[in-house]
C-alpha cells in the first residue's frame, strides 16, 4: 500500500471564505458489487496530541464534531475517537486511523482532507473501509463563532468544527454533494445557531449515514439560522450592522428555519429584539409566525419588510435581533439549544 507522510502543525488563527453550490441528494464515496463501501464493525481513530492538546478548543471542536454524528445520526457507532498519537506525522496506508492538524500547504491548499483506503472488491468481499486518516488545516477558526458573523452571512470565519464534521462524513463513506448539508464541498450551509455546536448533519447527511449504519427513530430537530438560504444557495443577508429606527422605518430581516430531523413537523417561530447580544429569551416581540411546516430534508426561508416595534423601544438604546424556531415549545427535540439564533442586525432608537 502506498504510504505518504503528512507533517502535523499547531493551531493558529485565520479566516477564509467558501463557495456555494446547487442542491442535490447524498452520494457515497466508493462502491463494490453495486453496494456502497462502509466500515464493518467498530474502528478507533487516534487523536494527535500535538494538534489537539487535552482541554484545548481544538480538541473540543473535534470531539463535538464526532459527537454530532455518533449521538444523533446513527444507531451504531462505526468509528470513534479512542486513543492518542504524539507523532509529528500521519502516515497514510499503515492501517492506523488518525486525525490531526497540518499546514494548508501540506494538504494541497484544502480546508481538510480525508485519505480513505478500501479493502479488495470481489464476489465474497464488499470492499470495506480499512483506513481513514483525517487532516485539517491549522489556520481555521477554532471554537464557535458568533452566528451573526458567519462566513456566508457577513464575511466571518470558517469554523474548523464544520470542516472536521465534513471530513468525518467522508470517513463514514459519504461523498461530496451540493445540497443543504455538511457534505457540500464548499462548506456547510446554512449553519444553525444557538448556545451549543453551530454545526450538525442535516437531513441529507442523516439519510446517507442511516442507509449504511442505521438511524434512530423519531429524531426531531428544528433549527434556526442567521444565514439566508434561498434558490439553492446561501446569500448575504440584506443588512448587517446598526440601523437607526424611527416610527416610519422599514427594516429588512432575512433568516432560515430548517428541519434536520426524520419527521415532518408543524411549528411556530418568533422574531424579537433585546438589549444584549446574549438575551435569547424575553425582549420585545417583533413578529410571530404560526402554522409553518418544515419537512424532513427541507428548509423554510422567509424575508419580510416590516416596521420595527419602535414604540416599545427605549430611547438611545441598542437592541439585538433574534429569531426562535418552535417558539411555543411544542416539540421535544434532540437539540434544543439550536432553536434561537443571533442576527447581525442591531437597532438603535435615537431620541
Image: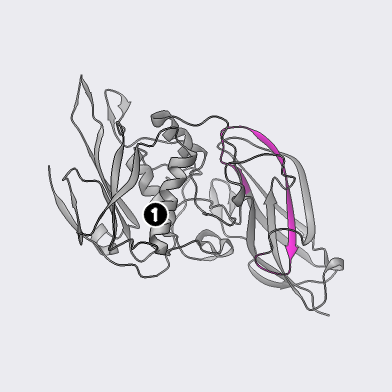
Please provide the residue range marked out in magenta.
257-278
- Mark 1: which secondary structure? helix
Q: Residue at 38% of width from left, 43% of height from top?
A: 169
> Quick one: quadrant of the N terminus?
top left
**Relative height, residue 261 to residue 64 (above, below):** above
> Quick one: quadrant of the C terminus?
bottom right
Q: Quadrant of residue 163?
A: bottom left
Residue 4 in view (yes/no): yes
Q: Residue at 51% of width from left, 44% of height from top?
A: 180
What colour-coding does the image apply? one colour
Residue 185 in view (yes/no): no
Q: Residue at 58% of width from left, 35% of height from top?
A: 296
**Relative height, residue 301 to residue 138 (above, below):** above
Q: Nearer the viewer, residue 147 or 247?
A: 147
Q: Is residue 19 left or right of residue 172?
A: right
Q: Nearer the viewer, residue 108 or 207?
A: 207
Q: Position of residue 96 (x, y in %)?
A: 21, 46
**Relative height, residue 167 to residue 217 (above, below):** below
Q: Nearer the viewer, residue 307 or 277?
A: 277
Q: Residue furthest top?
A: 123
Q: Which residue is mark 1?
A: 62
Q: Quadrant of residue 175?
A: top left
Q: Position of residue 221 (x, y in %)?
A: 59, 41
Q: Is residue 184 left or right of residue 313?
A: left
- Whether residue 275 appears in magenta in the rendering, the answer is yes
Amino acid at each position: 500500500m502506498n504510504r505518504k507522510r503528512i507533517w502535523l502543525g499547531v493551531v493558529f488563527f485565520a479566516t477564509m471564505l467558501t463557495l456555494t453550490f446547487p442542491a442535490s441528494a447524498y452520494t457515497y464515496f466508493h462502491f463494490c458489487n453495486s453496494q456502497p463501501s462502509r466500515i464493518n464493525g467498530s474502528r478507533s481513530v487516534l487523536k494527535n496530541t500535538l494538534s489537539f492538546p487535552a482541554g484545548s478548543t481544538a480538541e473540543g471542536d473535534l470531539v463535538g464534531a464526532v459527537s454530532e454524528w455518533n449521538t444523533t445520526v446513527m444507531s451504531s457507532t462505526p468509528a470513534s475517537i479512542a486513543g492518542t498519537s504524539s507523532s509529528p506525522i500521519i502516515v497514510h496506508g499503515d492501517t492506523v486511523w488518525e486525525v490531526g492538524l497540518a499546514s494548508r500547504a501540506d494538504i494541497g491548499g484544502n480546508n481538510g482532507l480525508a485519505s480513505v483506503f478500501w479493502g479488495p472488491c470481489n464476489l465474497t468481499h464488499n470492499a470495506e473501509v480499512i483506513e481513514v486518516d483525517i487532516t485539517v488545516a491549522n489556520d481555521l477558526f477554532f471554537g464557535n463563532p458568533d452566528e451573526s458573523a458567519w462566513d456566508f452571512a457577513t464575511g466571518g470565519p470558517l469554523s474548523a468544527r464544520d470542516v472536521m464534521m465534513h471530513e468525518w462524513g467522508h470517513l463514514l463513506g459519504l461523498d461530496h454533494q451540493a445540497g443543504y448539508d455538511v457534505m457540500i464541498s464548499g462548506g456547510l450551509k446554512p449553519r444553525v445557531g444557538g448556545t451549543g455546536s453551530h454545526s450538525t448533519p442535516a437531513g441529507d447527511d442523516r439519510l446517507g449515514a442511516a442507509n449504511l449504519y442505521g438511524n434512530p427513530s423519531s429524531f426531531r430537530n428544528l433549527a434556526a439560522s442567521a444565514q439566508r438560504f434561498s434558490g439553492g444557495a446561501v446569500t448575504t443577508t440584506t443588512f448587517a450592522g446598526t440601523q437607526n429606527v424611527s416610527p416610519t422605518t422599514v427594516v429588512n430581516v432575512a433568516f432560515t428555519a430548517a428541519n434536520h430531523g426524520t419527521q415532518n413537523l408543524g411549528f411556530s417561530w418568533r422574531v424579537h429584539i433585546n438589549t444584549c447580544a446574549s438575551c435569547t429569551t424575553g425582549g420585545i416581540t417583533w413578529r410571530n409566525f404560526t402554522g409553518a411546516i418544515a419537512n424532513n430534508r427541507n428548509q423554510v426561508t422567509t424575508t419580510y419588510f416590516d416596521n420595527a416595534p419602535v414604540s416599545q423601544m427605549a430611547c438611545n438604546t441598542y437592541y439585538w435581533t433574534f429569531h426562535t424556531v418552535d417558539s411555543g415549545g411544542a416539540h421535544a427535540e434532540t437539540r434544543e439549544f439550536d432553536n434561537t439564533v443571533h442576527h447581525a442586525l442591531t437597532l438603535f432608537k435615537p431620541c
